[in-house]
Image (cartoon, grey):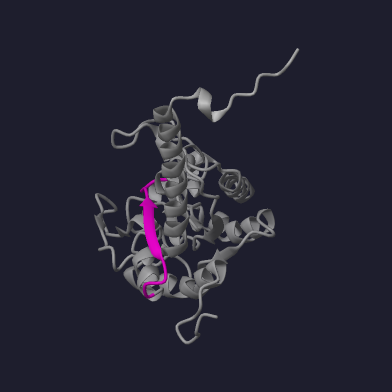
């Protein structure tokens, strides 16, 4: 039996031209995508809770007002990077590492606050990303959730693994981002506002979180925010003060530059 090999003459010229046009268009799109990828600024996603959202601590506890974008630590970080990268923020007040709240909060299902459930969609929504900064763990200290520092740390490790195994978004060619975990500062004095009902007697647990995360995430870039800010100094003892937002954003700038291979302002790119 002879194999019948089609030759160009067997196809109408219009069909050949249509196929060639499609191939050229596809090639042009690939070239354009690669060019755009090479020219764009690195993209950073901050994925956190109310301390990334910009919650302003107050004597009444809540409802809370929000710091302006330039004053919260992701905005300070972006300014300190001086145009070297784009900083995006996904901050949700109440967000946990991997715990579901048993009931809805402010009309949102309790499961929506679980970062383990919501991170994949955030990555897909903001891709392409070069760096993911995760700062979570404070809400997991709530007494009603019963989490241990080790359990919170292992939950953070799962988020890191989840990010590293992330595919290419929704029909895109982009690789997963590098991950930097920022360990939140320990609780301050929580006795002065209604938030005491959630965080009373959790101070020791909050101080144990940093060493637990460092053990669980050995080999992963980790920054202990306490080195820059000390314990949480907002009047509620649960949130950063405005001054601490500035401290943290400035302290993270060199860490982020190293993670992305960016030159310092005094260096000249090779």
Q: Position of residue 130 (x, y in %)?
A: 50, 58
Which quadrant of the structure image shows residue 20? top left
* Residue 250 in sight in this render: yes
Which is nearer the eye, 157 or 199? 157
Left or right placement of residue 182 versus residue 56 in this view? right
Q: Which quadrant does the N terminus fall into?
A: top right
From the viewer's perspective, is residue 179 above or below residue 269?
above
Which quadrant of the structure image shows residue 70? bottom left
Q: Position of residue 248 (x, y in %)?
A: 43, 70
From the viewer's perspective, is residue 56 above or below residue 77?
above
Q: Residue at x 42, y 75 (%)?
A: 250
The stretch in magenta equals 82-95
Left or right placement of residue 51 versus residue 163 in this view? left
In the image, farthest residue toward the top: 1
The stretch drawn in magenta includes residue 125: no
Which is nearer the eye, 129 or 158? 129
In the image, farthest residue toward the right: 1
In the image, farthest residue toward the bottom: 266
Q: Position of residue 96 (x, y in %)?
A: 47, 45
Q: Position of residue 33 (x, y in %)?
A: 44, 52
Q: Residue at x 64, y 59 (%)?
A: 220
* Residue 245 in sight in this render: no
Which is nearer the eye, 104 or 61? 104
Q: Which quadrant does the C terminus fall into?
A: bottom right
Q: Residue at x 60, y 43 (%)?
A: 165
From the viewer's perspective, is residue 264 above or below residue 2?
below
| Total numbered labels placed on residues in the image | 0
Q: Residue at x 35, y 73 (%)?
A: 79
Which is nearer the eye, 264 or 224? 264
């Amino acid at each position: 039996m002879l194999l019948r090999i089609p030759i160009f003459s067997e196809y109408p010229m219009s069909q050949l031209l249509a196929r060639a046009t499609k191939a050229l268009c596809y090639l042009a799109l690939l070239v354009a995508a690669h060019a755009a990828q090479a020219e764009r600024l690195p993209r950073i996603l901050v994925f956190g809770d109310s301390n990334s959202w910009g919650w302003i601590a107050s004597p009444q506890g809540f409802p809370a007002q929000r710091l302006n974008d330039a004053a919260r630590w992701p905005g300070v970080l972006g300014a300190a990077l001086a145009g070297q990268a784009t900083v995006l923020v996904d901050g949700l007040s109440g967000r946990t590492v991997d715990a579901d709240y048993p009931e809805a909060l402010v009309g949102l299902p309790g499961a929506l606050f679980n970062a383990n459930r919501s991170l994949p969609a955030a990555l897909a929504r903001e891709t392409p990303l070069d760096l993911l900064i995760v700062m979570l763990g404070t809400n997991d200290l709530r007494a009603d959730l019963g989490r241990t520092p080790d359990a919170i740390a292992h939950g953070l490790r799962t988020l890191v693994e989840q990010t590293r195994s992330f595919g290419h978004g929704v029909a895109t060619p982009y690789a997963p981002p590098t991950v930097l975990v920022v360990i939140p500062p320990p609780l301050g004095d929580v006795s002065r506002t209604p938030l005491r009902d959630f965080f009373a007697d959790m101070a020791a647990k909050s101080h144990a979180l940093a060493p637990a995360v460092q053990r669980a995430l050995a080999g992963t870039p980790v920054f202990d925010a306490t080195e820059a800010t000390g314990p949480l100094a907002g009047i509620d003892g649960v949130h950063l003060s405005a001054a601490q937002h500035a401290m943290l954003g400035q302290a993270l700038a060199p860490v982020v530059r190293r993670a992305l291979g960016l030159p310092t302002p005094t260096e000249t790119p090779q």
